[in-house]
Amino acid sequence: MTAPATTGTQVVSPTRRYGAFLVYFVLGVGFGIVLTKSEVLSWFRIQEMFRFQSPRMYEIIASAIAVATFSVQLIRRLGLKSASGELITIPPKPLGHGVRYAVGGTIFGLGWALTGACPGPLFALIGNGLTVMILAVGSALAGTWLYGFLRPRLPH
Amino acid sequence: MMAMVSGPWPWYVAGPLIGLFVPALLLVGNKVFGVSGSLRHSCSAVIPGRLQYFRYDWKSKGVWNLLFVAGILVGGLLASHWGGPQGVAISEHTRVALAQLGIHDFSGLAPHEVFTWRALLTVRGFVSVVIGGFFVGFGTAYAGGCTSGHAISGLANLQLPSLIAVVGFFAGGLAATHFIIPLLW
């Protein structure tokens, strides 16, 4: 949350807030570099993955999940607070009927293979000079908006 | 060391680094690693209409994510200037399969026959960029997350919904790769 996080009587100063925003940008830069140097943003790698012709993407995804899982469980066990002073909590995802995850996930998967990119890589590809992906992002925004429009009528 | 700068990174460097973004964002500001939220925040900021889904305080909930995404774009720009050998060294089997689909230019991150402004006038260019992008945006909003939010953050938090979503990701990806692409190209 960007609202000043109160820890007891302490209020986070505006300078610290802007500092935090800079950190998010810098982390994004790092992530864009990793997406590029790992080649996970490549349409060719995605094709190779969905054709089961190389273990590379699976090794990357599995090791990323392993490191993330270990970190999250460790943070939880230690009951750590963030630099912004909040107790770190990850809100659980409501299961509902599960329809949104199965159907939405499948629709996303179709798009993932067709564009060869999920949302992070789409932005990294634009940075890499694949400017036509600006249109893919525009299309993705239209898709997100249509979901917002249809939401009351869709099963979740 | 120079190979780390110019060449692609091995999986055991790339994968763990990606995973570390989850604790990094949690430790900095209690933020859950994810990218697709930025699409919702953008809609909320620009064209919320009267839709309930977009009517929330995107400034307090989404600015960090929009900055993160802007950073991703800049990171891609920086990394692309570090040069190194062009082209992605995919498996020979994939090359052969793609050549049968009419892909012969393996020099970029994505085939130039499909992912250029000119190619939008072809069926495969339009389907890949415009329809594919649309499915990414709709699907990720419906599922409530993408590869980062579900496959990495969600699974790391042992969420069953994320597991269902990830199975869906692969079901859709396999269907597109083995049925739709061969059919339409």
Image (cartoon, grey):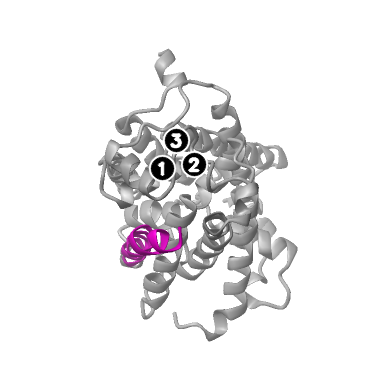
- Write down the quadrant of residue B131 in the picture: bottom right
Tell which of A69 and B180 is nearer to you. Answer: B180
Which secondary structure dominates the residues rendered in magenta?
Answer: helix
Q: Which residue is mark 2?
A: B110
Image quadrant where one finds the N terminus of chain A: bottom right
**Badge 1 density bin: few <14, some 14–19, many ≥20, Cα 10 Å:** many
Residue B169 drawn in magenta: yes
The amino acid type, in three-letter code, at marker 1 is Phe
Rendering coords of residue A107 (x, y %): 44, 67
Q: Which stretch is magenta?
A: B164-185
Disc 2 vs disc 3: Cβ atoms closer than 8 Å? no
- Distance between the alpha carbons at the discs numbered 2 and 3: 8 Å
Mark 1 in CB contact with mark 2 (< 8 angstroms)? yes
A138 inside magenta stretch: no
* Residue type for callout 2: Ala
Q: CA distance from mark 1 to mark 2?
A: 6 Å
Q: Quadrant of residue A140?
A: bottom right
Query: Are the numbered discs 1 and 3 placed on the same chain, yes or no?
Result: no
Are discs 1 and 3 less than 8 Å apart at CB?
yes
- Measured as percent of width and height from the top left, residue A126 is found at 61, 42
- Please give the chain letter of the residue carrying mark 3: B
Q: Residue at 40% x, 27% y: name it.
A: B8
Circle 2: element type: loop
Task: Label 3: state its secondary structure.
Answer: loop
Give the vertical position of B60 relative to B79 (above or below). Answer: below
Taking the spot 69% from the left edge, 57% from the top edge, the residue there is B59
In this figure, which residue is indicated by the disc labeled 3?
Answer: B106
Q: Quadrant of the C terminus of chain A?
A: bottom left
Q: Give the residue type that dot 3 points to.
A: Phe
